[in-house]
Amino acid sequence: MGRNRTKSGKIRLAEVAELAGVSPITASRFFRNPEALSLAKRTRVESAARELGYVPNLAARALASQRTEVIGVLIPSLTNNVFSDVLRGIYDASENSRYSIQLSNTRYSILQEEKLLRLFLAQKPAGLIVTGIDQTTESRAMLDAADCPIVQIMEIGPHPVDMMIGFSHYDAARAAVAHLFAQGHRKIGFVGARMDPRVQRRLDGYVSAMKDAGLFEQRLVVTTATPTSVTLGGALFTDLLAREPGMDAVFCANDDLALGVLFECRRREIAIPEQIAIVGFNDLEFMASAVPTLTSVRTNRYEMGNTAASMLIDAIDGRRPEHPVLDLGFKVIERQSSSARRSDNRPAASGTGAANKMVALPSGHD
Amino acid sequence: MGRNRTKSGKIRLAEVAELAGVSPITASRFFRNPEALSLAKRTRVESAARELGYVPNLAARALASQRTEVIGVLIPSLTNNVFSDVLRGIYDASENSRYSIQLSNTRYSILQEEKLLRLFLAQKPAGLIVTGIDQTTESRAMLDAADCPIVQIMEIGPHPVDMMIGFSHYDAARAAVAHLFAQGHRKIGFVGARMDPRVQRRLDGYVSAMKDAGLFEQRLVVTTATPTSVTLGGALFTDLLAREPGMDAVFCANDDLALGVLFECRRREIAIPEQIAIVGFNDLEFMASAVPTLTSVRTNRYEMGNTAASMLIDAIDGRRPEHPVLDLGFKVIERQSSSARRSDNRPAASGTGAANKMVALPSGHD
DNA sequence: AGGAACGTTGACAGCGCTACCAGCACGGAC
DNA sequence: GTCCGTGCTGGTAGCGCTGTCAACGTTCCT
């Protein structure tokens, strides 16, 4: 406390330059493009900066350069486990870059998304990560006009704004249903909550698979706009059971619902998978640990966030990816809850999440 | 598209001022302190800004005013359910303020926290939210010297940097153990993972309660530094059982572990609560829905984040709270997993998370 | 009636940094 | 020897906004 030269007590670039015996602009270059300096000056500036504990003023930098080093991220939910994994991937990838993450929550509202997008764009972000492909026309126009790289995450679709990384929820749902067919199930119910576009596409995949097999019936589908929860899984399953007591399997649009169904079955003394098979979606950690272990569709959430942020940063720095649209695929992880109707569904006493058998691999269409 | 006057295509404050027929500085004041303007000018500036679609340039504002409108948030984990609730509270509270949230993940490392703190402070944030009370000496010094309001969240302790909001993990753990005592349990195990300071204090509370009752034994405690998970809960419980087969209850440092214990008991055909009672911590949503329903210590996570951010914003705006240290307390939510050793632990067929009986209310010491 | 007090407004001068372009030294091509 | 390119460096001029202070008109008090 007392090493300062300027009234505000902060070290400025000018001080660093002075100590290093170079002009401010040279010092500035050191921080943005060190290769442009001669080795001698480079080391001089570096040690001067270190000695003074210089930290650049981002506001001044942003004002002068007319762009920020902020990556805007728009996600629909902060509560959902799914997004916390994606977010972790994003933060991890941004950590050692010079970009900082600005996160906003659209709460599953595309109008809110539009508003936030406008806000973000006004600050000229270095890049943008948005969730999904269902934006308002207005949002879409803003994205198209934006002069920064953009990555859409969570799913893939036909008309990317720029880059895109995700997987086909439709295909993933079809694979889940196909797996249940393969185990001999026919009357397969669907349970879904918070019918956001991706859950809707999972439903579409389920419907198409069922129709292809000539097994679709509307009363096998129970959905609600209510946010998802374990408790809700039990309640929706109860509804479904009332409508169709002869059901032999349930495909749950997410793992929380699946866990709720598991508990509800336990409450009703319904044997899994003998009487009812269960398949979840996302393959959260607990699925491998439940009793019986629960089959789920594994999605690469962390990787999605991580790759999205890496791709974005690369694109910002001028290294555009070869493939702007990346399909990260999915895997049906078969576990006890949907294994073929054998009798030995009681596992050994110790090991949790025993053997996981992969059923379908990365996506691709149909 | 074409409405712009300046080269960059952006509307500046000067344009708004011109259209409104006032000086730029008056227009500036409109956005920061509208009450200072006469009604006439206020409406003129307002309509001019709206007409031009003016959005202030935050970088310029930050540079000129020497402070940002950023609230820095340091949390130890992005994965943990607990923090997603807290975060949601923070984001909700900040949404309609002019402040934006800058989030960083310390990954439970106080060294990383120190580094991030230095980074944050260099940008002169408007306020800071930090997790817990265990900072490095250096961090503590930086916080003490910071010229912005600071809220410590998640727990309360004796020497607040500034404001503080949380609850006593120690007391909460004691209350959980007291509840188990009240149900007639004596050999109570402790299962803990990722022993961060708060989990450590829960352990301390457990130990003190057990010692007070003359029941403490070191072999009843199983902990690990590994990040928590449901699967880990099962594994740690298995350890515990091997050490002390006569155990009649387990206090889990969080709900994921408790769920893991539940599943492990099911695998081993151990009856809950008849043979082993379970108490979790945090009262996540699924606890009320499990079979049997799981007792837990409810913590006010959303409220903690929300109040912290509100308090912080108020403090930034000069309205300091009456009570800078807020104890949000906790509640032991008694459910089937720890109910007194009755025989009717099989619930009715339908309703999930049936009756919750509150046991201990807001904290206070001992 | 005179003056103080207040509410309202504007001029000026930067905040700390970078874009732009000019200038210098050096070396190779002609 | 002249010309030009290349690599490095520096000067100038802002980026868009706000802090400070002075000045104005009005009201209220004595």
Image (cartoon, coloured by chain):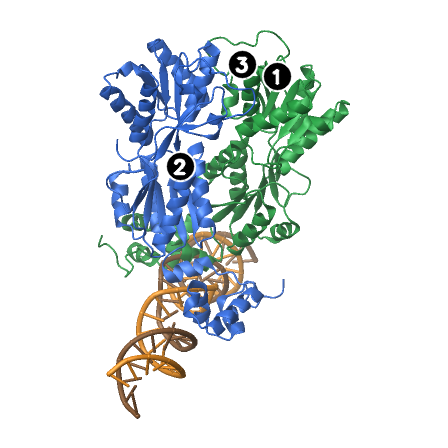
Chain colours: A green, B blue, C brown, D orange
Residue B82 placed where, x, y %? 42, 33
Query: Which residue corresponds to the image point at 24% horizontal and 41% vertical from the top-left?
Result: B159
A203 w.r.t. A250: above or below: below
Q: Nearer the viewer, mark 3 or mark 1?
A: 1
Please indicate, yes or no, whether residue A299 appears anywhere in the rendered image: no
Q: At which x and y percent is residue A37?
A: 40, 51
Q: Nearer the viewer, mark 3 or mark 2?
A: 2
Name the residue tied to disc 1: A338
Q: Is residue D18 left or right of residue A184?
A: left
Residue B300: give its label: 2
Q: Is residue A269 left or right of residue B64?
A: right
Residue kind at label 1, given as amino acid type: Ser
Tag 2, which chain? B
**Badge 1 element:** helix
State the separation of the CA atoms marked 3 and 2.
Answer: 38 Å
**Foreground residue among A8 and A341:** A341
- Residue at 34% x, 30% y is B360
Q: Residue furthest top?
A: A343
Residue closer to the observer: B59 or A49? B59
Callout 3 touching callout 2 (CB < 8 Å) = no
Q: Can you say which quadrant of the picture contains the N terminus of chain B?
A: bottom right
Disc 3 crowd, CA 10 A, few/some/many (<14, 14-19, 20+): few
* Residue neighbourhood size for the residue with mark 2, other residues' Cα within 10 Å, grouped as few (<14), some (14–19), many (≥20): many
Discs 1 and 2 share one subunit: no
Q: Amino acid at mark 3?
A: Ala
Disc 1 to disc 2, C-alpha distance: 37 Å
